[in-house]
Amino acid sequence: MNAKFIGKAKITKQGQVTLPFEARKDLSLDADSEIYWYLVDDHLVVVKELVSVEDLIKIANKKRR
């Protein structure tokens, strides 16, 4: 599984988070893009395509091998 540190972000009082520029660039996200959040154990996972929880686990396990 490939892992890459992208940066950090602060959560505003309104609960908003800005994705770091490198994440937006690497994932080809623009201002109208949607992202999806999953909680996997103690990890927050952000993906650019909606997948089922089962598929997300399969993807993670496949990449891990």
Image (cartoon, rainbow, N blue to C red):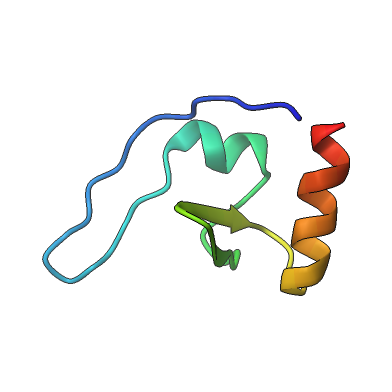
Give how far across and how far down residue 8 sits, in percent.
Answer: 33, 35
Would you place residue 41 above or below residue 50 in this image? above
Which of 43 and 8 lies nearest the eye of the viewer? 43
Q: Is residue 48 rendered to the left or right of residue 45?
A: right
Residue furthest to the front = 41
Report if residue 51 is visible in the image.
no
Q: Is residue 50 left or right of residue 19?
A: right
Does 6 sit above or below residue 11?
Answer: above
The residue lying toward the viewer, choosing from 44 and 19, is: 44
Picture coordinates of residue 24, whole percent (x, y) = 55, 43
Q: Residue 37 sits in which quadrant? A: bottom right
| 1 to the left or right of 3 | right
Q: Quadrant of the C terminus?
A: top right
Residue drawn at x 59%, y 68% as measured from the top left: 34
Residue at 68% over, 45% down? 28
Say if residue 1 shows up in the picture.
yes
Residue at coordinates 74% horizontally, 64% vertically from top-left? 49
Q: Quadrant of the N terminus?
A: top right
Residue drawn at (17%, 59%), measured in percent from left and top? Answer: 12
Residue ranking furthest to the left = 13
Q: How many marks?
A: 0
In percent of width and height, residue 40 lies at 56, 59
